[in-house]
Amino acid sequence: MRLPVIQIILLLLINSSCVKKDPMEVSLGNTPIAPVIQPGSNIERKYLALGDSYTVGHAVSPAESYPIQTKTWLKENGIKGINDPQIIATSGWTTLNLQAAIARENPAGPYDVVSILIGVNDQYQGSDTTGYRIHFTELIETCISLADNIPAHVVVLSIPDYSVTPFGKNFDVKRISREIDAFNAINKEIALAYKVHYLDITSSTREAAHDPDLICPDGLHPSGIEYKKWADKLGPIMQEILK
């Protein structure tokens, strides 16, 4: 018996509705699903510390240097992912030596924070303030470039006053202190002009005149106790940068 055309059409429609669809198609349709991105708890924070013997931590263990103690402070105060600082520093370096070392090592930025402490050897070796101003300005420009061109991610530390140390007392202590102040006036002026952070640690180092525990057994460089004082001041600045 031949079915009427209308019945054939109805049967075809019923059969097509019973065809099983792909479960993924049923649940998702054609809507693309964006990947779920978890908050970046494992973000790495890069810190570059530039300088001379004060930065490398001459005569103390690496853990007592101020860059490492600053990293420790940051971890203890909620900043995660901070890498061991990359340190470009050697005892005896002047601003010119540091510039040459940066060019030679070609550090791979950008860095989240760059700190710099340089100038005591310029003073000790009798460099004039004009040359220091030129080289320090160039170094600050380099620091900003390495900090992804963000001046607020650069921190300048002032030059310690070694006139209060047993080594410094072998020289004209008043002249040393006066010249350190002159060099610090320059680096502070440049820091403010470029809108980078400036941290005065010089007054802290002068406390060694009445506290020998703040000086290493070599009679010249700061002890780990003194470096911790710097880290306790630098840490909060870096904490704000890294939040």
Image (spheres, grey):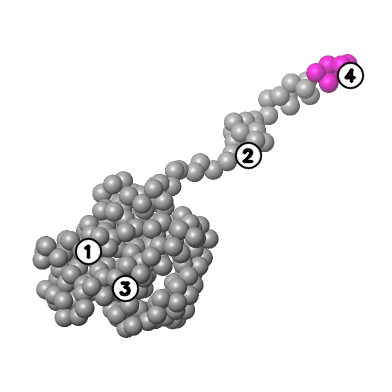
Q: What residue type is labelled 2?
A: Pro
For residue 207, side relative to residue 237 (left or right): left
Locate residue 137, reporting x and y percent.
Answer: 48, 70
Q: Which residue is drawn at 44% across and 43% down?
A: 39
Locate residue 35, reporting x and y percent.
Answer: 54, 43
Residue 32's tag is 2
- Point out the image quarter for the N terminus: top right
- Quick check: is 79 in the magenta stretch? no
Q: Which amino acid does label 4 sit on?
A: Val
Alpha carbon separation for disc pair 2 and 3? 67 Å
Residue 5's tag is 4
Name the outermost residue toward the bottom: 125
Magenta region: which residues? 2-10
Secondary element at image label 4: helix
Q: In the rendered image of this protein, does residue 152 appear above or below residue 23?
A: below
Alpha carbon separation for disc pair 4 and 3? 108 Å
Q: What residue type is labelled 3?
A: Glu
Q: Can residue 158 be seen in this view?
A: yes
Q: Mark 1 points at which residue?
A: 205
Residue 189's tag is none
Q: Nearer the viewer, residue 161 or 65?
A: 161
Secondary element at image label 3: helix
Alpha carbon separation for disc pair 2 and 1? 62 Å
- Asked if disc 1 and disc 3 are in contact, CB closer than 8 Å, the reply is no
Alpha carbon separation for disc pair 2 and 4? 41 Å
Q: Residues within 10 Å of mark 3 (few under 14, many from 20)?
A: some
- Quick check: is 3 in the magenta stretch? yes
Alpha carbon separation for disc pair 4 and 1? 103 Å
Q: Which residue is drawn at 24% across and 66% down?
A: 65
